Image (tube, rainbow, N blue to C red):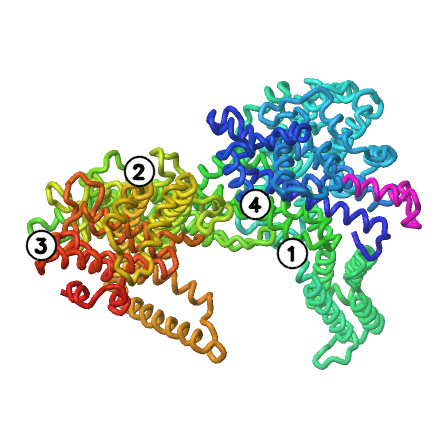
Amino acid sequence: MDLEDSNLAIITGLRIVSKGSLILTELQNLSENIPTPFLFNQTNTDKQTFLIYKTLFIDFQFLQNRSYYESQIENNEQLKDIDEEICDSYFEVIERFYNLFESIYKYGIQINSFVKDLNEGIFITQNLESLCADPDGQQILSEMLGLFGVMLLLMDKKIQGIIRERLIVAYIRYKGPTNLSDFDKVCDLCRKTGYIEENNKKPNKYPETYFSRMKLPETLIELVLSRLHSEDIYQQSKTYLLQEHRTTALSGQASLLYVILYFAPDKLNSDSSFMTEIVTKHFSDNFVIPFYLGYNVDLTYEWDKYKSASQALNKVLKRKQLKLIWSVHEKALPKLRKELRNNLVDGVLTNEFVLDNITDLMRLVRSANVTIRWIILHQTSQNKKIQNLISGYAKKKILNFILDLAQFEFLLTGILEELLDNKEKKWSKHKTEAEDCLIELSTFFSGEKELNRIRKEEQLQSWFKETAEKVKSLEDNDFKSTGLRIQELVRALEGVKSFHQIQSSLQIKQFIGHVETQLQQMLRTLNVKEEFLNNLSIVSDMTYAWKIMNDYIPLIQQKIKKHPSSVIKLRSTFLKMNSIVEQPLLRINQAGSKDQVTVSRYYTSALLGFVRRVLEIVPQTMFRTLQEIISLQTDKIKEIPTKIAKTSLKQWAQLDNRFLLAKHTNSIALFTQGILAMKKTLVGVVEINPKSLLEDGIRKQLVREIAKILNEKLFFKTSKIAEFEEKLEDLADTLDGFKRSFEYISDYMNIYGLKIWQEEFSRIVNYNVEQECNSFLKKKVRDHQSDYQSKTIPIPKFRKLDNQSITCMGRLARILLKITDVKSTSFITLMSAWFDPIKGNEIIGTKTIGLLSKSIGVAGLNGLDKLISFMLVDKLQNFVSRYWLILKNNPEFNRNLQFLSKKLRPISMTPLNHQKLYQQTISKSSQMLDLFHKIIMDLGQGQLLRKLISNQLNFLSKIGSGLLYSTLKILNKGLLSDVQSHYENPQDKTYVSEELISELNKYLELSGFSNPYMTIFITTKPIKMLPLILFMFTISHLQKLVYNKRLCSLVRIKKNEGIDGTPFVVGILSLLKQFHSSHLKNYLGYLGQYLRAEINKLQKDSKSLIYPEHITKLIMFLKEFSKIGNINKRTIEVYLPPYLLNCLED
């Protein structure tokens, strides 16, 4: 269709149709991505979740009593939190769904407006009837109406009615007050119909009552049905010349008829003559039809409830007639396949062969496609009569036929394209050759040629010269006249051969024969037309089988598994299926719409997904073989020592095992060779690279195997350290064996094994950490938003193995926290390890962390660090919430704090009766101090674990990559210097690139450069009394600790006390780091004030120079606190007298 030559009405209609193709693409895309919560029902959801979702996601009943349903959610904190979480996570998708529903409604309005404009003469030269008489207009109006019907059918098929209602209600709830002008009409169009796709349950008068929700002009429907009834609107009969191919030729408009007839149900029910004519013309031997891109329907089932339609079908589809139709196709299939295979023999399908037999070859392609189309479609029939006839027909035969046909079409298309590309060049070559020969003959009969004894023949000389001029005047742009002229010239040359002068000269006869050959070649070249390629494209269309081909995937995979080289034929099959991309783009391209990329991307990715599913058998088989290789390399083949005794040489050779290893390696190499034999192929807008497909398939299987190993091995029945270490060792050995074997076969698979292993292992760990962290977030990171999850190479999800953790990384983090619980362990700073306080043996230290790094690697350690950080953030947020709640519910405690704060001001003074003041407030602060005890112990434990992980990462970086470590260290130092220079002189010094800092930070974290103790986890409003409460907590809980000179650390007094010295110090420091630095200064001020008061009291009461234990403990606490927190001497000396500072230093 040429837009420049089209009138305005056709251009406008074409744009509406192109918009329809876009809407259908969006509908299919969104239907595959319905948010999981909206899919709930009693069968797929547990009872508790079902009740929650039932309250949150209401159907259109919500519109009748909005305030009631809103109050149910508002009055329930749990429901409110879940509702906010779902809104944050899914609102963008929900909005897209509403926009889709609205666009379907507006598409119907556009049709009405277009018809109204036609009737009112807006388009001047065109009205509705004249547009229906126009060949292009017929197509546009039919497609416009048909696409709207397809939208309604697919919307109800792909997005169940109850789900549509939930999505629309969720949209207006989450969107808030807004003006939606067409909201009521959109709701009316999208309300549930009662149709359920799962059990194919259809309510009475469905879908005609559903279609009647949008009133379309009856005149338009009548005119379109009339054209489809009487005309071949796509003019396909020129391509399908035989009578038995008529229904296939009209299949495009038959699909439109099926849909549009639901807008006129009276014809289906009571117009017998019309339906008889329709069925006879369009459905006499094709009653399973695709109504849109692979969505097929069986008319014997769909029209069963319509009187006129079912009667018309029954007339033509009697059992005897069905047997006859099936018999024709059943007999044709083996004959056609034999013909195809004969033409596929190497050396048969050449350029010369195609030139000589193009008509027969096109007939073969046409017949083969018609036959296979009928068989594939009617195998899906719900009609028992036809099922009994063809259900037993082997799908394997059908698949082999498709592969041969696709290969034949691919080769024929390639030859035709080559002939068309070289047509002008070949024409010129043969024409010049013929002309030169004729001129030579003319010269020959001039009698002027030296050493030529033939006498001059002016008539022959003149005739050959004139013939040469005639050849010169031949043009290749007019097939009919030029073809006739060439045939006349050939006949004339045959006639001239009878002349005595020519018969007596063998040389002249050869020359004339050569001219005839060149003219024949010109005629054959002229016979190659663009029309052949267009016809080939039409008859080879396979959009009807788009969904059905999924059923053939197991058969294709079996074929590949048995014969890896058969992958070569698959390339042509994928190209044959490329029509799924081309068909929806046809009108969009003609309209010049910008939506081409969106539509093309969807269908290309769908086709690419099919290709991947087919070819994933290759990496699956490879990995099954890899398991054998792993078993051989880890369990059976022993490593050869440096020296071997001559007598045991045969034993160490391990010939049987090495033969098996070579055999398995060879089988992997064969599969790789088979895939790589496929050439690069353009599918839609994406080029299929066989190497990339192989690598993606290998990555997918690798991810599946690693994820499975991690999930199985990182499951702990108890919190015993022996089991924990045993599991880690087992995991390390399993992954190491897998990794070594994978690297071994990577050369035979033509991939970078180590690179792929590291990338995918890191991605799996990060994804598991991300999913675990989701439990601490209101706005979850969904799979489609994740940087680590991929549709092409998905990371599998597994069911929860305990009540708390979602993934293996969660289980690992929680078991670490459980093993190092302060109630059952003591952390010794000198050893950087947790010990059993009763038995004295090490529980977790550098050895365990080393084992951890060996099993889960750098990515795993970094992931653990991130996950523990999220856990600490969650604890801190809960702490802050509870802190304010206690203050709110306990006004007396608040007054006591205010009173104590006033009494201790200014901090530089020494308060009177300080012990009484402290004890009175502490005795009334048990609830708050218990809260601080929990958060400080949790923070201390988590931070110590993070510190151990950081140290291990730092060690691995130094040992594993010293150059990278030094580079990062220098670069980090340089950037910090640049940042400092910027803040000192912002006008002259620019700030460092944020992108560079972000990228560098990733490397610094993985290399353990960060100091966990300095981490700021949360930002919150100031807590004014925090330093004072922390001070009271410190002096009250130090009573439970004692300073151990041997361990140089504070340790608990009672073994069963839920407190430990180092976590106590680290926890307080980490808590203070979350707030303004003034809190730390005030805290140190309170401690200094307390020490001064205690020493003053000591000097008054006693002349002893020995400090009591509680003062010594506090001094040692401050020493450890300042050391861990990197607090310099100047900060401390503001609050403590010099002699106490000397104690700290000593």
Q: Which residues are magenta?
A: 108-131
Between the residue at mark 3 and the residue at mark 1, the CA separation in whole angstroms equals 89 Å
Q: Is residue 505 visible?
A: no
Expressed as whole percent of the image width and height from the top left, the position of residue 961 reads 28, 65
Task: Indicate which disc residue 417 carries.
Answer: 1
Q: Which sits earlier in the primary sequence, circle 1 or circle 2? A: 1
Is 519 or 419 nearer to us in this picture?
Answer: 419
Query: Which SS class for mark 3?
Result: loop
Secondary structure of residue under mark 1 = helix
Residue 124: in magenta span: yes
Mark 1 vs mark 4: in front: 4
Q: Are marks 3 and 4 in contact (CB under 8 Å)?
A: no
- In space, the residues marked 3 and 4 are separated at their CA atoms by 71 Å
Give residue 1097's position: percent from left, percent from top.
Answer: 17, 56
Residue 1049 placement, left or right of 79: left
The residue beneath circle 3 is 1046
Which residue in the structure is indicated by mark 2?
Answer: 712
Q: Is residue 213 magenta?
A: no
Q: Amino acid at mark 3?
A: Arg
The residue lying toward the viewer, choosing from 515 and 456, is 515
Q: Which mark is residue 607?
A: 4
